[in-house]
Image (spheres, grey):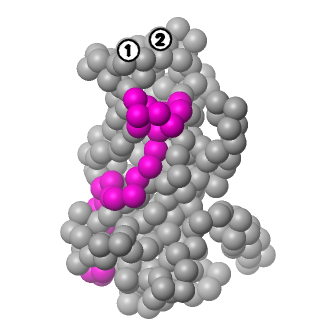
Amino acid sequence: MRSGMLRRALCICVVALGIAGVGAGSAQAETTWMVKGANIAEGFLPTLRTRAKTIILIHTKISGLKILFKCSKLEALESHLIWRKLLLWKLKGIKCVTEIGETVNAACEPNNNGTEPGVILTNKLLGELTKHSTGEGVILVKSTVEEVVGGVKQPVFGRIKMSAECPIGSNVPIIGTQFSLKDVGGNKGLEEEKVTHTDIEGPLTEIWALSKTEEHKASISGEIELELESGEVWNGLL
């Protein structure tokens, strides 16, 4: 059990070190996760529960049409706070539908490559607690996976897989540099010791569907709730 935990911790550290641009530099060295008022011990990986408080939406346009990917449930397949200020995620959207021009299109129901109706999976994601230039605390999230999209190797947060009959395509990659989350209570809410923190999309989000064009620019709306599996109070310190 101990050796398995150690292997997982080492794997996470390797992933963390391999993601270009995640480190915020020495100026951000004071930011950290806290559990019950104490820094997370090195090698300790508190498990984080992640769920949708409201419907999660990805907004974009494809072929001139307004597109909404809507998921009414969200859970984490893997989710940990990591020593100091990192967060590891792999998320699963459940009960997801696709709206084209404000109408649900059954042929475009996400299906996790034909294996699970209504499911969208992300790749493994790495977040970092940091400060926006305004002083606002955010979790800056990047993908750990790069794939070739449109002939260019770039970070991919995940692919929305649908049937071949879907008019916007059967495989829509969500690409981009990063997205960010912020506590609904701002810095005060982030730094407050509590069991449940609620987050929404923050500044610095740069994501697209399909390609990096103005039409395909995407955004995320909805609220997610974060809790430690242990039920202990926790917070982010800026």
Residue type highlighted by circle 1: Asn
Answer left or right for 59 relative to 7: left
Answer left or right for 101 relative to 169: left
Q: Furthest-bottom residue in view?
A: 38
Residue 100, x across and y down, in percent: 34, 18
- State which tag comes first along the sequence, 2 or 1: 1
Question: On screen, 114 above or below 20?
Answer: above
Q: Furthest-top residue in view?
A: 165
Which residue is disc 1 drawn over?
Answer: 105
Residue ID at (44%, 49%): 206
Q: Is residue 108 magenta?
A: no
Query: In which quarter of the view is residue 35 placed?
Result: bottom left
Q: Is residue 201 magenta?
A: yes
Q: Assess disc 2: are there few (<14), some (14-19) or many (≥20) residues with their C-alpha within 10 Å of its C-alpha.
A: some
Cβ–Cβ below 8 Å for labels 2 and 1?
yes
Answer left or right for 36 relative to 102: right
In this picture, which residue range is highlighted in magenta?
Answer: 190-217
Query: In which quarter of the view is residue 190 placed?
Result: bottom left
Question: On screen, 9 above or below 179?
Answer: below
Which residue is disc 2 drawn over?
Answer: 167
Residue ID at (46%, 44%): 207
Residue type highlighted by circle 2: Pro
Question: On screen, 34 above or below 20?
Answer: below
Residue ID at (42%, 66%): 139
What is the quadrant of the C terminus in the image?
Answer: bottom left
Q: In front: 111, or 131?
A: 131
Q: Work out how far the residue at label 2 is from the one at label 1, CA to CA, in angstroms.
A: 9 Å
Q: In front: 23, or 110?
A: 23
Q: In front: 228, or 221?
A: 221
Kind of element beneath mark 2: loop
